[in-house]
Image (cartoon, rainbow, N blue to C red):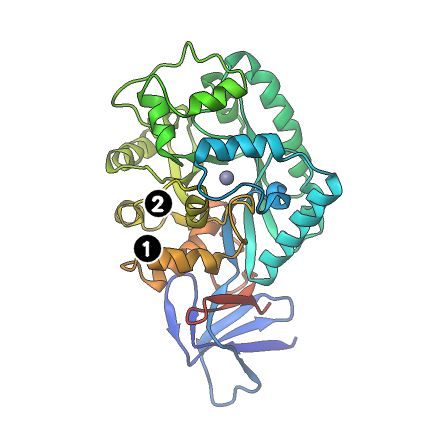
Amino acid sequence: MSVRLLQGEAIFDGKNLLPGDFVLVVNENGEISDLRPAKNEDQNIEKWPGILVPGMVNTHCHLELSHMKGVVPRNTGMVNFLLTIVQQRVAEQADILKAAGDAAQIMFDQGISVVGDICNTGIIQTIARKSPLRFYHFVEVIGFDPSVAENRFNFCRNIADGYSTFSPSSVVPHAPYSVSPTLYQLINQQIDSSVLSIHHAESKAEQDFFRKRESDFDRLHQFIKTDLSQHIVAENASSVRSFLSRFTNKKILLVHNVTISEADLIYIRELEKENNLEVYFAICIRANEYIGNGFPDIELLFRYYPDRITIGTDSLASNEDVNLMHELILLKKLYPAITDLQWLKTITIQGAKALNYDQQFGSFETGKKPGIVYVNFDQMRSERII
Ligand SMILES: [Zn+2]
């Protein structure tokens, strides 16, 4: 069987940065055969202009919204952003598929191997069936009124079942301000859907919604005609305290975390033990910048959960592109204390673990087939090799 020998400026194996004299040995199926120092008898070593890394993981995206690139102006704030999406997302099926398919192909070419994708319909099936990308499909359910919970859940479970014939899928809560306790209960009861995702602490307005009688979210709830008369607010409440204890025996990906506090992190750590949860964090920094929500305290997150931080591009409705290296440009500028090695873990092994894909992806280990990419930090670009 023929093999390829690959060398870069360094090799990141999912844990450590190995020096440039190491070679990655790959068989013709793309499986890792070996990772070792070069030998004198090695022939035809391919040299790549960057660090060799396993195929990357984008833990939060909405391919379905790819056709909305540039539709919502920058800096409108969370509620205006959501209202514009709700009112303007309708489009021809062919246009939605074209934009989503192009985004998926670009992600793959730039070195992303696995995507956590939020779905509101079954439309991405057409792309996911043919794409070399691997997916975790999160079918998002919305409903603050408990009386609609069962209908909404069943509708979404049906979509998720369509996806689950070829990829893992779960019905997941949209956000703490849009899901009822009954709906959380139905979501938690899914037995074979062990990974959940939820938009969390994305804006100050979200924390206000749980702490004050009035918040900017009232405009959203008026638009979708939600009855908020039963909604309880408390001064010491926080978004994560409104929902996390409703889940048991799950991996949960908290997406955004812009307004997460140290008290929230202590609470999460305690609840993980009590409810057998494994909590991961997805950061979508350029989407936060685009919408104008502010930025999360990532150094705080790294102090509590260095191994659970992952990166998402979010959708093209709130981003210029779906390029993880472009996310890292802004992240490195905002948080210069975090090292390149730490960032490399977030876009590979930690993302793979968050989406339950670490058996095959996220690291260079013999027998794994994670895809091989080179990343160049000087040029802030990445490209797929295999
Ligand atoms: Zn999102």
In the foreground, 161 or 273:
161
Find residue 334 and name its label. 1
Secondary structure under badge 2?
loop
Q: Is residue 207 above or below residue 338?
A: above
Q: Which residue is at 48% across, 36% downward? A: 197
- Classed neighbour count for the residue bearing mark 2: other residues with Cα under 10 Å, few (<14), some (14–19), many (≥20): many
- In the rendered image, the quadrant that contains the N terminus is bottom right
In the foreground, 71 or 371:
71
Instruction: Specify the amino acid type for callout 2.
Output: Phe
Q: Which residue is at 63% across, 52% downward? A: 104
Q: Which residue is mark 2?
A: 295
Question: Which mark sits nearer the N-terminus, 1 or 2?
Answer: 2
Q: Quadrant of residue 151?
A: top right
Secondary structure under badge 1?
helix
Q: Quadrant of residue 263?
A: top left
Q: Is residue 285 left or right of residue 236?
A: right
Q: Position of residue 130 (x, y in %)?
A: 71, 51
Q: Is residue 244 left or right of residue 116?
A: left
Q: Is residue 21 left or right of residue 30?
A: left
Whether residue 179 is visible to the viewer of this picture, yes or no, is no
